[in-house]
Image (cartoon, helix red, strand yellow):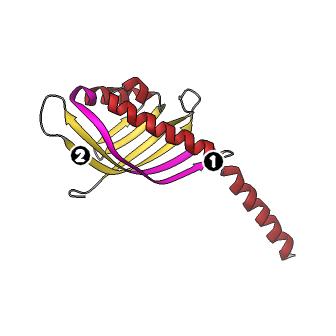
Amino acid sequence: MLRPFLVLLLAISLSTAAAGQSADPKGDKAAIDKTSEAVRAAFARGDVPAILSYHHPDVTKALAYDKYLVGRGALEADLRSTFENYTLEFLQNDVELLSIHGDIATEQILFSVKGTPKRGGAPFLFKGRTMLILVRYDKSPTGWVTLREIVQPAPEGK
């Protein structure tokens, strides 16, 4: 009696695990990598429309403890303000984790960004870890967009 139950349990477990996996993990990884590269290049150019094209309309971003953005409009306003005052260059973008489950991907990245004030002043370096939740989105140039992001700044001196 126990044996049929174990076989059934194993079959359910395997079918559930398979249902959550991507049908094309290599293609999805390549598209997500391309998304990341395009976003970083757009940041370097200060290209707000390009950056927005890789963000879901309902995006939320927790960029700092007291900086929480909701929606593409809030992101656009924040980007325009930032690019009025700074040029940004990604110096580090080390993917620690990429997990793709169907139409949702989670990516964890160690990053560093160099910011240079446009009106003079010393450049700064912002380092930390970010976790992104990406979703398939047919209006994205790569088919993937950021839906959620949370940033954990590195401690001083790291």
Helix, strand or loop at disc 1? helix
Q: In whole angstroms, how far apart are the C-alphas of marks 2 and 1?
A: 34 Å
In what element is the residue under mark 2? strand
Q: Give the residues in magenta.
A: 83-110
Q: Amino acid at mark 1?
A: Pro
Residue drawn at (56%, 45%) of the image: 29
Disc 2 residue type? Leu
Image quarter (top left, top right, bottom left or bottom right) of the N terminus: bottom right
Q: From the top left corner, tell me how far across and down residue 98 is, in percent.
A: 52, 51
Q: Relative to 55, is 115 on the left or the right? A: left
Residue 96 position within the rendered picture, expressed as x and y whole percent measured from the top left: 45, 55
**Which residue bears the numbered disc 1?**
25
In this rendering, the count of numbered labels is 2
Could you tell whether 57 is left or right of 79 in the image?
Answer: right
90 or 129, which is in the foreground?
Answer: 90
Mark 2 Cα-neighbour bin, 10 Å: few <14, some 14–19, many ≥20: few
| Spot occupied by residue 138 in the image (x, y as percentages of width and height) | 59, 29
- The residue carrying mark 2 is 125
**Residue 90 forms part of the magenta stretch:** yes
Q: Compared to 124, does 48 lie above or below?
A: above
Quadrant housing the C terminus: bottom left
Q: Would residue 46 be found to the left or right of residue 14 on screen? A: left
| Mark with earlier residue (2, 1) | 1
Q: Image point 49% across, 55% down: which residue?
A: 97
- Residue 20 highlighted magenta (yes or no): no
Which residue appears farthest toward the top when viewing the image?
Answer: 49
The residue that appears at 82% across and 68% down in the rendered structure is 7
